[in-house]
Amino acid sequence: MTLFSSPPSYVRLSSLLTMSSHKTFRIKRFLAKKQKQNRPIPQWIRMKTGNKIRYNSKRRHWRRTKLGL
């Protein structure tokens, strides 16, 4: 066994899918949906009467929380 062994294949595949410029259409569609979901709520929704929503609790920071592809 070598001292510097390569990471498992699923780790390399995951990084290949998210960081590569050659994405499949399914991966690209998945990333596009996540990008659209990751935004603050509109201000007019906060101003509605009887509104209890203050912020988007499902916001995701690109460095802190990964998508788990």
Image (cartoon, rainbow, N blue to C red):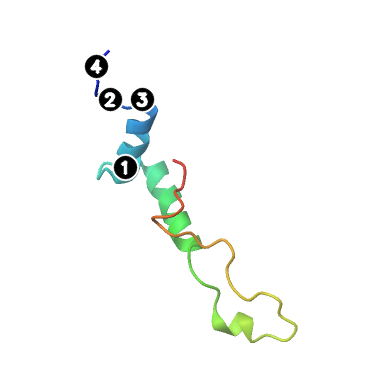
Under mark 2, the amino acid is Ser
Which of the 4 quarters of the picture holds residue 48?
A: bottom right
Other residues around mark 1 within 10 Å, as few (<14) / some (14–19) / many (≥20): few
Q: Which amino acid does label 4 sit on?
A: Thr
As displayed, is residue 12 above or below residue 28? above
- Along the horizontal axis of the image, is 56 left or right of 52? left
x and y, in percent, of residue 5 in the image: 27, 22
Give the crowd class for mark 3: few <14, some 14-19, many >=20 residues within 10 Å.
few
* Label 3 to label 4: alpha-carbon separation: 14 Å
Camera-nearest residue between 66 and 29: 66
Dot 1 corresponds to which residue?
A: 23
> Which kind of residue does numbered mark 3 sit on?
Pro
User: What distance separates the C-alpha of mark 2 from that of mark 4?
Assistant: 9 Å
**CB contact under 8 Å: marks 2 and 4:** no
- State left or right for residue 52 relative to residue 10: right
Can you say which quadrant of the picture contains the N terminus?
top left
Q: Mark 4 points at which residue?
A: 2
Alpha carbon separation for disc pair 1 and 3: 21 Å
Residue annotated with mark 3: 8
Residue at the location (30% across, 37% down)?
16
What residue does disc 2 label? Answer: 6
Q: Which of marks 4 and 1 is nearer the N terminus?
A: 4
Percent coordinates x, y for residue 23 in the rendering: 31, 42
Mark 3 vs mark 4, foreground winner is 4
Question: Which residue extends farthest front?
Answer: 3
Instruction: Identify the residue at horizontal 51%, vertical 72% (top origin).
Output: 40
